Image (cartoon, rainbow, N blue to C red):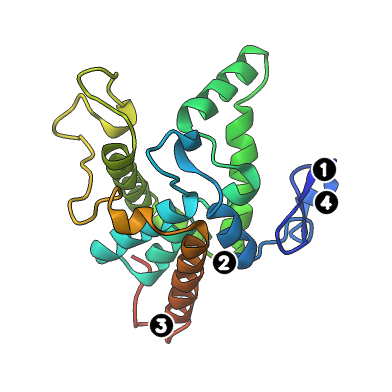
Amino acid sequence: MTWMLTPTGAEYHLSGAEAMTDAGRPVHIEDVAHQLALINRFHGATSRPYSVAEHSLLCCDIAARLGRSVHVQMAALWHDAHECVTQDVSSPAKRAVNAVACAGGGISAWTLFEATHAKRFRRALGLETVFVTARAALHHIDLTALATERRDLTAYDPTLNQPWAVLHDDDPAERIEPITWVRLDSPERAAMTWQDWRQAFLDRFHTLQHAMQQPQGQGGMA
């Protein structure tokens, strides 16, 4: 059995012949919002439950603060949507899986598996071009969110723990800094339930979707 049952009762095929068709890989916003609100970032190694849905909303907020278009804001919200079927595997774990697969004479198995499903979710919203043209901006937004999450929600101590190369800790000129206009460890955020984050994700999605459907010229792709 290589398919999973989604919260709406759909059957999503992770591999096999049916996984080669869009019909075998249904994408429903209700499933995405529900599952991302229940999947924890950092494998749960945070000071409070911190979901992929909340992370995605933070990325969307950062994109908006940077003055990015509604298309880029939607891409920021949607960049981890595929994790509702692949799970949120931490970057160190992904590299470890790839290393094991390559050591056994194979390929970077996790990267290939995840990329296949990420493309499906992006195509479902017609966001392929945005993810290509805004790749650098989206990557920086994601890392800025990561730096903020590390500051507010993890036990990271620069005097005890190794620097994170992905955040360029050893290079002051390139170091990714956390945002200053929000604290993820605030009582207000901690009080929100997974259902609250699910609804917040849905609300933001529908707001951006409506904005993207407005006549061209009311917000570009940048």
Asked if the residues shown at circle 1 and circle 2 are in contact, with their CB atoms under 8 angstroms apart, the answer is no
Q: Are the residues at dot 4 and dot 1 in contact (C-beta closer than 8 Å)?
A: yes
Question: In terms of depth relative to the viewer, which is nearer, 87 or 102?
Answer: 87
Q: Earlier in the sequence, mark 4 or mark 3?
A: 4
Q: Residue at 41% of width from left, 68% of height from top? A: 71
Q: Residues within 10 Å of mark 1 (few under 14, many from 20)?
A: few
**Is 65 on the left or on the right of 222, as rendered?**
left
Decide: few, some or many residues near mark 2? Use Cα within 10 Å; few <14, some 14-19, many ≥20. few
Residue that appears at 40% across and 83% down: 216
Q: Position of residue 161 (x, y in %)?
A: 28, 19
Q: Amino acid at mark 1?
A: Gly
Query: Which circle marks residue 172 in the picture?
Result: none
User: Of circles 1 and 3, which is in front?
Assistant: 1
Chain-order first, disc 1 or disc 2: 1
Sort mark 4 into few (<14), some (14-19) or many (20+) by Cα contacts within 10 Å: some
Callout in the foreground (4, 3): 4
Q: Secondary structure at mark 1?
A: loop
Task: Identify residue for label 2.
Answer: 125
Q: Is residue 98 left or right of residue 147?
A: right
Q: Residue under circle 4?
A: 18
* Mark 3, other Cα within 10 Å: few <14 / some 14–19 / many ≥20: few
Q: Earlier in the sequence, mark 2 or mark 4?
A: 4
Taking depth in this image into account, of 9 and 166 the one nearest to the observer is 9
Q: Amino acid at mark 2?
A: Leu
Q: CA distance from mark 1 to mark 2?
A: 23 Å
**Which residue matches tag 3?**
216
Secondary structure beneath disc 2?
loop
* Of callouts 3 and 2, the N-terminal one: 2
